[in-house]
Amino acid sequence: MPCSIEVSVPATSANLGPGYDTFGLALDIADEVVAELHSSPVDLSSCVEVTGQGAGQVPASSDHLIHRVVREVLDHHGSAELADRLTLRCANTIPHSRGMGSSAAAVVAGISIADALLACVGRGELCEAERLAWAVHFEGHADNAAPALFGGVSISMADAQGSPRSVSVPAHPAVRAVLVVPDTTLDTDYARSFIPEQVPHADAVANSAAAALFIHAIGRDPSLLFAATEDHLHQEYRRPAMPETLARVDALREHGLAAVVSGAGPTALVLGTGEDLRDEVVSVIGEDDADVIAASIADFGATITRTGA
């Protein structure tokens, strides 16, 4: 039986300074997907329509990441045939390859659609742990996936058995975000290739202290965000991959602003308080060679609306 599913998934920023592969937060910028389950098979060579970010660059066929995720999840539940009847309309707002979680948003959209389709045909639904496990299966780690799924600020890890775990921490209501988004893109795998296998013990100690402080700062005392976003594990090592981004981060931090690299870059994220945070950022680095976007932390992750069956 036909049904229609609407999914909204937020952009995310990961690492947040010291929380490499661990911290993430959802932003009030979102991609929207409408999935239609038809009564008969569709043409899989043209089953995806994309507008906005990535239009003309990502596949319009069943090779599209969202469609592939839907099919794999459905196949695991013995329902792969539903993907043959599925069309997608994607309205993308999240910039691609900028460190704002565009791939995590696509993965979470696919999982959410598959989950809703299973419910549509009466074959059960995925629990929270299953949704996170699927997201990590496709993404490789949970720092972007968890906030895309659940919203807010997340702390993620893998337990002794390798299963992903994530908890949400409340953000202080005064905390705001500003994104500095350049025109250039950066491949995540390339950015990760600069990370060494070992770091000095003193750096690890300093980083763990900053990470612990960050949890208190983001939730209770935003005045500590500058100290709590000091990184010793990844940003400096990645400087050769994105020198302009690190130059912006350096300049902003020299002016006392809590600036970090967003995810794998090249976007920079600034956390702070006050209505004039964006103006403060612009006063330091200008806005001629990058978009400077004011944003808020989104309380909600992926949202799903289903009509029909």
Image (cartoon, rainbow, N blue to C red):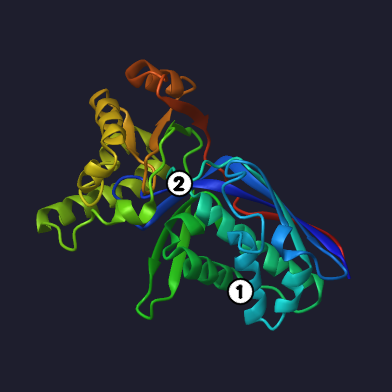
Q: Is residue 179 above or below residue 66?
A: above
Q: Which mark is residue 72?
A: 1
Q: Amino acid at mark 1?
A: Glu
Going from the N terminus, do you reach mark 2 or mark 1 first?
1
86 relative position to 145: left or right? right
Q: Amino acid at mark 2?
A: Ser
Across and down, in percent, residue 143 comes to: 42, 57
Q: Residue at x 67, y 60 (%)?
A: 61
- Element assignment for label 2: loop
The foreground one among 132 and 100 is 100
- Element assignment for label 1: helix
Quarter of the picture holding the C terminus: bottom right
Q: Quadrant of residue 226?
A: top left
Across and down, in percent, residue 215 comes to: 36, 49
Let me know if residue 150 appears in the view: no
Mark 2: give few (<14), some (14-19) or many (20+) Cα within 10 Å: some
Q: Residue at x 39, y 43 (%)?
A: 262
Q: Is residue 92 above or below residue 111?
A: above
Q: Is residue 37 above or below residue 15?
A: below
Q: Which mark is residue 97?
A: 2
Q: Which mark is residue 241?
A: none
Tell me, yes or no, whether the two marked residues, 2 and 1, touch with CB atoms within 8 Å: no
Across and down, in percent, residue 155 comes to: 41, 57
